Amino acid sequence: MGKTNGESFAASLVLLIVDSPSWADEIRAQLMRSGYVLSVVTTEDEARNLLEQQRPDAIVTLTMDAKWHPSHAFGASFDSANRPLQVLVTEQMGAVTADQPADLVLAPSPHHVAYQLHTLLRLRAENLKLRRHLQEVDEEARRLSEQLLVQKRSSNEIEILKNAIVRNVSHELKTPLLQVKSAVSLLSEDPGNTKLIEYAVDATARLESLVKNITLLGGSLDINLGPVIVRDAIEYSRRNLRRIWQHKSDADRIAVVLQENLPPVLADKQGLSTVLQLLMDNALKFSKDVVEVSANQFGDQVCIAVRDRGIGIAREQLGEIFESFYQVDSSSTRRYGGTGVGLAIVRLILDRHGTGIAVDSHQGKGSTFSFLLPAVKL
Ligand code: ADP
């Protein structure tokens, strides 16, 4: 420990006594009294050997010869911020030349040497602390700018999706509208035509689904994160499904399996409910069996999964299903309802939560869609 005026800090020194000056012992004794940990050597080679084993704070060379230089730099293997300080103590201060590599040259006055050493080491320790702090600030700034980039990317994607929807929506709405219109006018001439009735009902379902998705999209992009109880979000989505799901009783096929003592998740309540609603809607549509919604904690995250045992998705289609207006089967709308926007919305909402969606699916066996959210510590 180096000590001056009651202040102290850990410091170790290599004391290199080159040509046994008469005042060396006094300086050595003063440094010991000041609490430094000293390793005393008498040759450059010994000093270098020590440097390979230790990381001293300073090398203090005591010599009568003011022109004394180490044959090559001490501490060359340390990085510049960590290298030991080099202090030369000599009685011929006036003869010291500008090429002297020492950081500090001092006259052989024991108190003065101890005091200067202490001041310099303390300043260096503070400098190091400041550097470390600056590094942390730098890292934080980098992290924030990365986060900003992700948000920017996500808002760009939202722009792209919004534009795609605006571009497609008039077309998407026009087609079923025209179909309903022509079916209704034909029905007025041929009221019993069941084919026409079916046609009109299909087109109406497509219109309804489009309107539903656009409404969901509109309501889900403002993300306000807070603790959300997963069971509440699932129940809320199930109630919504019951209200809009064509076959209301299908919502009874949903089984909720939650781990005991599941913590709340950090999410936007509306956004999470929309994600769950869209995933459950698909799972019910594309299967006839039980749909399992589960949530389990893994470390500081919660994995939420929606699993069905339905028709599944071919491997080569898995990359595409998250694109807006994409449907694996072009007759999907007619057969299952939907418009191909749901999973694009799911991806966007989760992206705004800083998470993604995983899908595991096998044709004819079923699909599992899952995502991670941070657990809230209670
Ligand atoms: P849609 O409104 O058509 O359901 P989505 O974007 O939600 O639109 O889904 C896109 C396509 O991905 C669907 O048309 C379907 O082909 C496929 N898909 C989504 N979820 C499932 C699932 N659980 N099982 C089988 N196929 C699915």
Image (cartoon, rainbow, N blue to C red):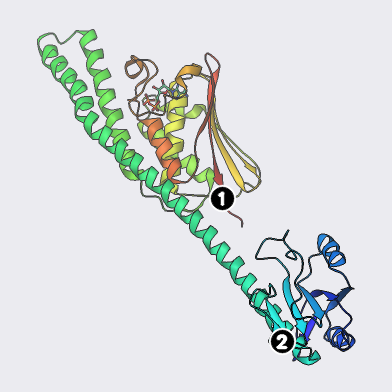
First in sequence, mark 1 or 2: give its number.
2
Q: Secondary structure at mark 1?
A: loop
Left or right for 45, reference 154: right
Q: Position of residue 211 (x, y in %)?
A: 27, 33
Determine whether 121 is above or below 194 in the image: below
Determine whether 323 is above or below 263 in the image: above
Which one is in front, 272 or 298?
A: 298
Which one is in front, 146 or 345?
A: 146
Q: Residues within 10 Å of mark 1 (few under 14, many from 20)?
A: many
Residue at x-position 63% and y-position 77%: 98
Question: What amino acid type should be assigned to the residue bearing mark 1?
Answer: Pro
Determine whether 282 is above or below 303 in the image: above
Question: What amino acid type should be assigned to the residue bearing mark 2?
Answer: Met
Left or right for 123, reference 246: right
Left or right for 244, reference 59: left
Q: Position of residue 26 (x, y in %)?
A: 87, 89
Residue at x-position 54% and y-position 43%: 231
Q: Secondary structure at mark 2?
A: helix
Determine whether 292 is above or below 196 in the image: below
Which one is in front, 76 or 230?
A: 76
> Residue tagged by mark 2?
93
Q: Quadrant of ligand 1?
A: top left
Q: Which mark is residue 321?
A: none
> Residue tagged by mark 1?
264
Distance CA(mark 1)–CA(mark 2): 71 Å
